[in-house]
Amino acid sequence: MAIKTQQLETMLEPVVTSMGYEFVGLEFISQGRHSILRIYIDSETGVGVDDCADVSRQLSAVLDVEDPIASEYSLEISSPGLNRPLFKISQYEQFIGEEVKFKTIRPQLENGQRKFKGIITAVENNNVVFEIESESISVPFADIDKANIVAKF
């Protein structure tokens, strides 16, 4: 996790949880003047537009005071949705048995593959174990760049 992302998470997660929501994670997409800070929240009863607006107001106030991002950016508050992103190792434990699409920072197989689709089968010693096409692959959590639950219809 990038240092900026860690700083933002440390600053914003307590605000979100104090409001009664689960802080799922955040993405900071740096694109010059069009950067995006996207915060994912959830709750047992789900998340609606009003929930996102309330959290946005609170986080905007904190971000205005702390000013952790030097450039211009847009703040987005979102529910995790059907293709829920996974940010923390505890979330992989929570969703054992679920199918996920994920991308790694570096190749995990001899063929150089970095994009995968598989089922989470275990979390062991900071590694996430996936079943991919009837084979088990253990990926260090630190090597996972991005992962999302595959929605079932």
Image: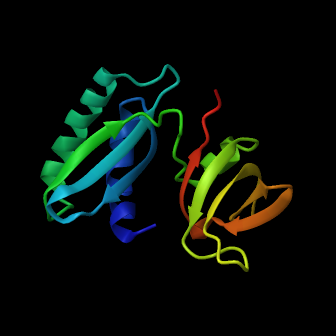
Most extreme residue toward the right is: 134
Question: Where is 121 relative to 98, above or below?
Answer: below
Please state which of residues 47 and 20 is positioned toward the viewer in this rendering.
Answer: 47
Most extreme residue toward the bottom is: 110
Judge whether residue 29 can be spotted in this image.
yes
Please state which of residues 145 and 142 is positioned toward the viewer in this rendering.
Answer: 145
Residue at 36%, 36% (x, y): give it.
78
Please state which of residues 13 and 81 is positioned toward the viewer in this rendering.
Answer: 81
Residue at 61%, 47% (x, y): give it.
91
> What is the x, y in percent for residue 22?
47, 36
With 153 as the anchor, is 72 left or right in this view?
left
> What is the x, y in percent for residue 123?
74, 56
With 152 as the anchor, is 45 left or right in this view?
left
Residue at 31%, 30% (x, y): give it.
52
Which image quadrant is residue 14 in?
Answer: top left
> What is the x, y in percent for residue 24?
47, 43
Image quadrant for the C terminus?
top right
Question: Where is 116 relative to 50, above or below?
Answer: below
